[in-house]
Image (cartoon, grey):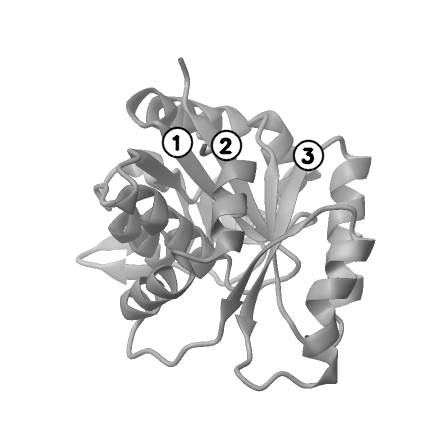
């Protein structure tokens, strides 16, 4: 039996997809689930010891307890901090969905569950007119949408979930990330409005936290949300009983 999986996308760049994906990976691992992770395309990679490295993928692998050097976790590493299609062009690379699917299938054969983290939002171009949304469809995975809590998030999140459904994708739910300790009026109403308007449940509200590094942030968030009732619903919705 192949692994279950989820494709994590965002309403925009910088909403915290990697942190949310890593928290979920850590929660699954703590529950004894063998979880694999893959960041199919990373642009803006740094170079370490002569090779390109995805910091996002490294965080995901740390949270899942998997090998950060496994190339199946990072099929495409690109230098420039640009849209993947342009970064790939500058590196002389063409992003191939079949290569990504093969990497995903190998992970799925080794793990009980696979978390796929996209790049930016659903409309980010990858290659030849193909978008992140097309990659999610090619992998036949449902979506978990990561949204920000502040002014403008209603519009961005509704556009994302609407576009997903127009393209035949299943949206399992929304996670609001970086929710402030003292929310303003816009943040106070965001969870309710998103839950009532975007046609899917809000499955998590991850609080803003101060942390010295990303690993500490993920560990603290996993502890904070681990026993919350919403987390039970979140894991159930993405396929973990």
Q: Dot 2 corresponds to which residue? A: 239
Residue 39: percent from left, percent from top:
42, 45
Residue 51: percent from left, percent from top:
25, 52
Q: Residue furthest left?
A: 49
Residue 81: percent from left, percent from top:
49, 63
Q: Dots 2 and 1: beta carbons under 8 Å?
A: yes
- Which mark, residue 232? none
Q: Dot 1 corresponds to which residue? A: 113
In screen coordinates, is 115 left or right of 204? left
Decide which of tag 2 and tag 1 comes sooner along the chain.
1
Q: Callout 2: few (<14), some (14-19), or many (20+) C-alpha neighbours within 10 Å?
A: few
In screen coordinates, is 180 left or right of 129? left
The foreground one among 115 and 92 is 115
Residues at marks 2 and 1, CA–CA distance in whole angstroms: 9 Å
On the question of residue 131 being in view, the answer is no
Residue 15 picture quarter: bottom right
Comparing labels 2 and 1, the label whose residue is closer to the camera: 2
The foreground one among 31 and 138 is 31
Q: Callout 3: few (<14), some (14-19), or many (20+) C-alpha neighbours within 10 Å?
A: some
Q: Dot 3 corresponds to which residue? A: 170
Residue 225 picture quarter: bottom left
């Amino acid at each position: 039996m192949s692994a279950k999986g989820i494709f994590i996308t965002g309403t925009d760049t910088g909403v915290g997809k990697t942190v949310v994906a890593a928290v979920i990976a850590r929660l699954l691992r703590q529950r004894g689930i063998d979880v694999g992770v893959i960041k199919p395309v990373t642009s803006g990679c740094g170079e370490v010891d002569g090779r390109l490295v995805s910091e996002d993928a490294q965080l995901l692998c740390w949270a899942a307890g998997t090998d950060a050097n496994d190339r199946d976790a990072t099929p495409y590493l690109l230098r420039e901090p640009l849209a993947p299609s342009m970064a790939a062009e500058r590196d002389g690379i063409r992003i191939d969905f079949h290569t990504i699917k093969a990497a995903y299938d190998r992970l799925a054969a080794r793990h009980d569950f696979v978390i796929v983290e996209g790049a930016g939002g659903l409309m980010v171009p990858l290659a030849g007119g193909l978008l992140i949304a097309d990659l999610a469809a090619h992998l036949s995975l449902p979506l978990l949408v990561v949204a920000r809590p502040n002014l403008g998030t209603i519009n961005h999140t509704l556009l994302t979930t609407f576009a997903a459904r127009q393209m035949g994708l299943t949206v399992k739910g929304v996670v609001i990330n970086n929710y402030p300790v003292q929310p303003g009026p816009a943040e106070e109403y965001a969870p309710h409005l998103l839950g009532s308007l975007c046609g899917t449940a809000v499955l998590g509200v991850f609080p803003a936290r101060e942390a010295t590094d990303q690993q500490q942030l993920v560990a603290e968030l996993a502890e904070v949300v681990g026993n919350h009732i919403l987390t039970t619903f979140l894991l159930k919705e993405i396929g973990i009983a």
